[in-house]
Amino acid sequence: MIKRYVSRLQDKSDALHCMILSTSTHAFLLPSVAIAEIYSQPNTSAQNTCTWRDISIPFTSMERLLAQADQERQFQHTAVLHRLNAVSATEPSFWAIGLTALPKVIRVEHGDLNVETDQQIPNCIAVCIAEESLLIPDLQVLESTLSL
């Protein structure tokens, strides 16, 4: 799935609306349609759930999902993401990650994206847009590692 997304960003003539989500260690590029809502509410990386619209949903940090050192940290903002994998009626259709800054909206045009081959992060593709290094996570794989 992630390779199709990157291929579309590189090869098609249409533009994709995306968001750059910043965490304490990386900036991630996600299609806007993957994000249900961004809201400002302090959370810590020690939490496993958060409350959004009166439902409890899984909460984590991207560092934890990528199996990188995840010391407890405070997040000022939360990105609620749509679940991509099949869910049962008892599982929430959303999950959330902590952010250190408000997201940046970006329109990715044909030819804006360059894949960086020197950066190897599991379940991500490193890219560069306008000299900014970003990671495109494989949300389907990362989501499957959540403990629900």
Image (cartoon, rainbow, N blue to C red):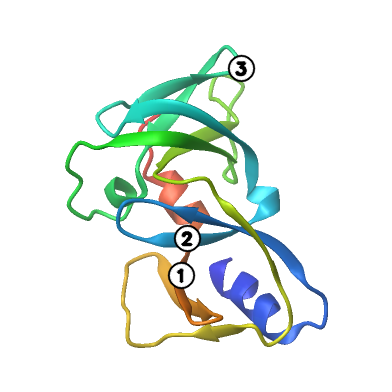
- Spatial CA span between label 2 and label 3: 25 Å
Q: Residue placed at 56% from the left, 75% from the top?
A: 3
Disc 2, SS: strand
- Spatial CA span between label 1 and label 2: 5 Å
Q: Are marks 1 and 2 in contact (CB under 8 Å)?
A: yes
The earlier-in-sequence mark between 1 and 3 is: 3
Q: Residue placed at 61% from the left, 17% from the top?
A: 53
Circle 2: residue type: Phe
Residue 70 vertical placement versus 2 (above, below): above
Residue 93 vertical placement versus 25 (above, below): above
Residue 95 vertical placement versus 135 (above, below): above
Q: Which mark is residue 28?
A: 2
Q: Which mark is residue 112?
A: none
From the viewer's side, name the closer residue of 67 and 106: 106
Query: Horizontal placement of 83 versus 78: left or right?
Result: right
Circle 1: residue type: Leu
Q: What residue would you read off at disc 1?
A: 134
Residue 135 vertical placement versus 46 (above, below): below
Quarter of the image for residue 107 reads bottom right
Quarter of the image for residue 29 reads bottom right
Query: Horizontal placement of 67 versus 56: left or right?
Result: left
Circle 3: residue type: Arg
Q: Residue placed at 17% from the left, 52% from the top?
A: 69
